[in-house]
Image: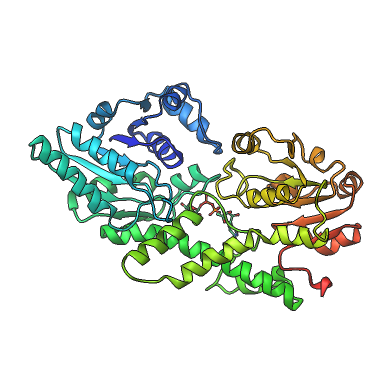
């Protein structure tokens, strides 16, 4: 099938490469010339396992191409995917201007039936706006042309995006039109392992499904973080509680890991956007507000623990940071807990020496040259002479360090474990002062 994808960000690029992999003819369009030139040479702008090989293979096979020419894009694909960004507006709502510009562009150039597929995470009602925008442009052109709009939200996780796309749990298709539904069924047939993964529904329900999934996952995390803080005050260990509740199949073990807060490009933005959508229709989403508030507070927890340990005396201290990305296997630092911690430490006059397996360039890009941020190339170099170590991202490389060497390298053997990856009892036996999340019962 011939398909055009507008937007070569995370979602657009993964979608394009994966749809090409199963034999479709994909043209990815973006207004960023530098990005398109790089992509034509197989240079990927994001860090995502397996994506570079996938893009290279499909480029070479001629199934995947890149262009800045919107007209060429509209001519190319029977299906026109919109996968551009929907950044948060100042008030937390999703900014739809990029989506609607693409809708206008498609309507300006189309000369035949097209199916517009909303892949970006967009508020409920956006498909209607896309339809209205396109109808307006077509009317201005004085042409009467048939098109359909489908909502097909993406559920991929950064760091596992290719696997998530190739082996989806479900494929949501929101449409009110049988012809469009049939095309989308055909397109996704190669991804139906064992049984049909497509769940078809009306457009607004499909749009809401995306927000509902992310909000539910964010809720699980905030719930566990709240319980972790409570466990600490009650002298209980949240990790044992986690085991205890996860065993209940109605609860399950997924997404109940307490930590220093959720970040990334989706959860913070989507919870806030859904809250905003609710307000717009006169409903106060109290649970969502709490999920967000708990997460904001959770990002302060490491700061508070460090403050308490050093009794506020942080000026001139050196704190080692393991992990900058908002989670492992990505270089993404959007809304990352590491940023809240670093900014707190700088404010308090401390120096940060940080290592991350993927996000060093990103940290340099965000913060530029500053004296109180030293980016080093190994975890060992980060801890050398540091007053304490804070683990913010649970990369595998941090899970089993040489604790003997670590203790010698640190000026004082203190670990703040923002992801509960270490065994507190073991560390205390090894001579460390250990702070985890929700597990400091010894401190009662
Ligand atoms: C998420 C959704 O999982 C995905 O389906 C959607 O399409 C986009 O948003 P992503 O943002 O890539 O994906 O990351 P995810 O792996 O879901 O983690 C999000 C955040 O939650 C991370 O900061 C992670 O550290 C945190 N998290 C996750 C926890 O704190 N505890 C958990 O138990 C799970």
Report ligand 1 position as a quadrant: bottom right
Q: Position of residue 209 (x, y in %)?
A: 37, 60
Check the image and name the residue furthest to the bottom.
234
Relative to 238, does residue 379 appear above or below in the rendering?
above
259 vs 191, nearest the viewer: 259
What is the tally of numbered marks visible in this picture? 0
Whether residue 362 is visible here, answered yes or no, is yes
At 71% across and 64% down in the image, what residue appears? 437
At 10% across and 41% down in the image, what residue appears? 139
58 vs 12, nearest the viewer: 12
Where's the C terminus, which quadrant?
A: bottom right
At 37% across and 26% down in the image, what residue appears? 65
Relative to 302, does residue 20 appear above or below in the rendering?
above
Relative to 146, does residue 93 appear above or below in the rendering?
below
255 vs 391, nearest the viewer: 391
Q: Position of residue 403 (x, y in %)?
A: 86, 50
Where's the N terminus, which quadrant?
A: top left
Q: Quadrant of residue 299?
A: bottom right
Q: Quadrant of residue 117?
A: top left
Answer left or right for 26 relative to 375: left
Answer left or right for 162 relative to 337: left
Whether residue 145 is visible here, answered yes or no, is no
Q: Quadrant of residue 196?
A: bottom left
């Amino acid at each position: 099938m011939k398909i055009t994808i507008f937007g070569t960000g995370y979602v657009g690029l993964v979608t394009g490469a994966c749809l090409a992999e199963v034999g479709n003819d994909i043209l990815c369009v973006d207004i960023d010339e530098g990005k398109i030139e790089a992509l034509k040479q197989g240079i990927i702008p994001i860090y995502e396992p397996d994506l570079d090989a996938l893009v290279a293979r499909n480029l070479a096979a001629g199934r995947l191409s890149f262009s800045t020419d919107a007209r060429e894009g509209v001519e190319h694909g029977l299906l026109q995917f919109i996968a551009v960004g929907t950044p948060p507006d100042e008030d937390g709502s999703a900014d739809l201007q990029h989506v609607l510009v693409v809708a206008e562009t498609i309507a300006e150039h189309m000369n035949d039936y097209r199916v517009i597929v909303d892949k970006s995470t967009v508020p409920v009602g956006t498909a209607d706006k896309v339809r209205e925008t396109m109808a307006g442009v077509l009317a201005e052109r004085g042409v009467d042309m048939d098109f359909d709009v489908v909502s097909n939200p993406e559920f991929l996780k950064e760091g596992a995006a290719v696997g998530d796309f190739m082996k989806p749990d479900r494929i949501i298709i929101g449409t009110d039109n049988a012809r469009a539904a049939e095309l989308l069924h055909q397109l996704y047939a190669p991804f139906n392992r064992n049984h049909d993964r497509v769940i078809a529904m009306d457009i607004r329900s499909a749009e809401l499904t995306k927000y509902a999934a992310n909000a539910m996952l964010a809720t699980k995390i905030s719930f566990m973080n709240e319980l972790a803080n409570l466990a600490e005050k009650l002298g209980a260990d949240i990790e044992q509680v986690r085991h205890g509740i996860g065993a209940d199949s109605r609860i399950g073990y997924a997404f109940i890991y307490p930590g220093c807060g959720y970040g990334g490009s989706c959860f913070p933005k989507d919870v806030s956007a859904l809250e905003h959508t609710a307000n717009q229709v006169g409903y106060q989403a109290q649970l969502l507000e709490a999920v967000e508030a708990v997460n904001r507070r959770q990002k302060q927890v490491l700061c508070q623990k460090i403050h308490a340990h050093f009794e506020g005396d942080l000026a001139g201290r050196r704190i080692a940071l393991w992990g900058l990305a908002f989670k492992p296997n990505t270089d993404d630092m959007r809304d990352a807990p590491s940023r809240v911690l670093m900014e707190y430490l700088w404010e308090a006059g401390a120096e940060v020496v940080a290592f991350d397996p993927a996000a060093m360039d990103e940290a340099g890009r965000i913060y530029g040259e500053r004296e109180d941020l030293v980016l080093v190339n190994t975890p060992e170099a980060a801890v050398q002479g540091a007053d304490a170590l804070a683990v913010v991202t649970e990369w595998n490389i941090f899970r089993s360090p040489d604790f003997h060497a670590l203790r010698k390298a640190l000026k004082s053997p203190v670990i703040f474990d923002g992801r509960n990856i270490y065994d507190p009892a073991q560390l205390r036996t090894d001579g460390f002062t250990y702070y985890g999340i929700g597990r400091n019962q010894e401190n009662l």
